[in-house]
Structure formats: C-alpha cells, structure tokens
Image (cartoon, rainbow, N blue to C red):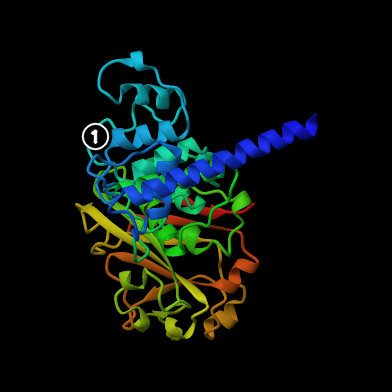
Amino acid sequence: MKKIILLTVGAFLTGLALAYAAFAEEARLQFSDVTGHWGESGIMGAVGKGYVQGYPDGTFRPDRKVSYAEFLKMTVDALGMQTNEAAGGKWYAPYVEAATRAKIYKTSDFEDASWDAPIPRKDMAMLAGRAVGAEMYSQFAYQETAEEYLYVAANLGLVKGMGAGKAAPEGETTRAQAVTIIERMLKVKDGQTLEPADRNTRMDAELAWHRTNMYTALENELHFDRIGTQFGRNGYVMETKDGLYKGEMLNLYVIDLEDPNDPYRHVVKDIDSLIWMRSKYYGMHPIKDFPESYLLYFSTKIHYNKDTSKYADTGQRQKIGTVGFGTTDINAFIEGDLNGLSAVYTKTGEHLPGASTFILPKARFDNEDSIAIDLISPGSSNATHKTLTLFTQS
C-alpha cells in the first residue's frame, strides 16, 4: 500500500514538473522579446509559477519599469498569500492589506511615494528582505531602513550589482529585475543559500546604508559573530555648547592599499604621494611602500566656525583622533616600522583638505580587537570631545 502511495505521489510530482516545463517553454515561445535577454531564466520561472504574465501583443516587456504596487502584487502572489478582495479602494488594496498582515509592508514605508511610481531598488530590497526575514541575517542591531535592507540583501544574494560594483539604491526596477529578485527570494525561503553580490557592490550598498564601507572592506579581519559598533547612517556632528563651532564627519572610506583596483582609491587625491610619520621631527614614509595596509579616510565638513580666535581655522577638516591599534614598539615605529595606526599627510606634511586620514597595517588585526574615534573641537584649551566606537570584538 505504501509503495502504491509513493508511486502515486512521485507520478504526480513528475507530472507537475513536466507541466511546469511545458508551460514555461510555451511562454518562452509566446514572448517575442525574452529569448536572449539576461533575465530570461527568471522570467520563465516567474511565468511558469503564474505570478506574472505577459501582454496581449505577445511581449513581456522585461525592461519596462515596475511600480510599487506591481512589485508588491508580484511578491504577494509569488508567496501564495491569501488576499481579501473586500479590502476596497484601488486595485492593489488587497495586496497591500495582505502584505501588511504578513509584516512585509509597513504603512510608514513609502509615505512620500505614489503606489504608481517606479519602485527604487532599495525599497524593492526592503520588501523582499522582510519576506525572507532578512533581519535574522544581519550582524548589527536592525534599524529598519531601506538602505540597510539593501546591504543585507546584497550579502544574501537577493540583489546583485548594476555594473561597475554599484548597488544603485535609487535605481528604478524593471520587470526582469523584479521577477529575478522574487525568484531568488523564493529560493532563500526554501532554505537555499545564494552567492552574495560581488564585494564592490556590497561595499557600495554598505556605504549607502551607514556612510562607510568598513565592515565589508574588513570582512576578512573582523569576527562578525560578536561585533559591536556605534556607527550610524547620518554621520556624526561635533557641536560646541557655546554655539560657535559645528563640524561633522561625513563618510569613512576604508581603502585596501594592496588592491590597485580598490573602488575607493579615486576618493583620495594623489594617493600614491601621501606619507605617514610619527611626527614632523621623525622621518616621512610613503604609504605606497606599505601596501599590506588599509587607508582610513574620514571625509569631513565644517558647518560653521564663528570664532577662529577660539577654534582654529582648519578649512573643512573636522579634527579626528583615534583610540586603539596603537604602536606595539615605539622605537621601531619611529625608525619607520609601521606597527600601529598612524596619521597620513600630503608629501609636504600637511593634512589632507577636508579629511582626517590614517594608515592601519593589516598585521595589527592579529592582536587588537577595538577602535574608536574622537571628534575634537579644534584649537581650544578646553576642547569638546565626542568619542564613538567603530567596532569592538569583545
């Protein structure tokens, strides 16, 4: 009896697979604009599952933009969710209600956007990410921003790059992209592990999320199972209580000096001419001679300095100090052994305009587990400090 049941189930599944293959092939022949398209496989999978259709003229229009409403409908249908046709209102109201019930969509998500507007990649990643429980895959305290979902989605392999290592968070979504991401979403929900987006795309997504590429750039150095950080998305502002000075750290770029193709080398002007030194009384050392290192480039901005007699005029450079990764041998350091974090200057010994810059040898990660930065008001005997942890691995 068991054998008969198993044979019957097996025959049913085989028949289902054959029917799906036949349906997909029929759809392939039906569409005049799909064969050879980069998204052909995902399109056929989506059409075969029935959550998206073509147009009466025999086209699929894979490069047509997808609206918020259309992507939400595809997602709800692909997940086989029940919709309440009595939800009323616009045609997409039942899908919004179903997605809200499943906590895929929140009413505060797209307050400034029309449901008929093209959905940007970051919002698409947020809906798809919620559908797979992306917050469970993040090593950080979740902040529920679309940019953070894009970062996690890139690490999960839900989204890939848009060429040249760009995550394109504001980029509009096409029908081919939409079904490709939904197909990946279904695979993750089925327990499959996908290949992450390329490293440059993941760094770009991280930068869009919280203004640094640090955690992706240092992924081979850090222990993500126990990392902690205070690094957020909106930058860090240093404002004195007297209201005379306000500066801000904008972005932190971590550049691998060992990689001539690092995508952020272009951020630093004349990078190969820069030097590090313990102080002006000791030797200058070209950073290009220390390739097994990272360059930490903090871009900064001075919003205002109303009293340069009290707060030194530093142009657009917010003064930043560091705590952690200090030298392990001061005498060797003075002699030119880069064994700890060091400030970086132009070849004439000046600070880089609008930035605070440091070099960090990779070898120091072998015996160091935390680093913090100190935003300091410039040139004051009673300086204001704001200390923030970049990472700790305790």
Query: Is residue 321 placed above or below 344 in the rendered structure?
Result: above
Residue 234 position within the rendered picture, expressed as x and y whole percent measured from the top left: 34, 46
287 to 236, vertically: above or below = below
Q: Is residue 368 left or right of residue 378?
A: right
Q: Amino acid at mark 1?
A: Ala
Q: Is residue 150 visible?
A: no
Residue 5 image point, x, y percent: 73, 31
Depth check, front residue: 8 or 354: 8
Give the quadrant of the N terminus: top right
Give the answer, above or below, for where 302 lies relative to 190: below
Tell which residue pokes out farthest to the top in this image. 86
Is 256 on the left-hand or right-hand side of 92?
right
| Foreground residue among 363 and 10 | 10
In percent of width and height, residue 120 lies at 29, 45
Q: Residue at x 36, y 76 (%)?
A: 345
Picture quadrant of residue 261: bottom left
Q: Residue at x 41, y 56 (%)?
A: 160
Please give the count of numbered marks on the rendered protein.
1
Disc 1 element? loop
Residue in the image at 44% along x and 58% along y: 202
Residue 136 image-quadrant placement: top right
Q: Residue at x 60, y 42 (%)?
A: 14
Residue under pointer 1: 113
Residue toward you, 142 or 244: 142
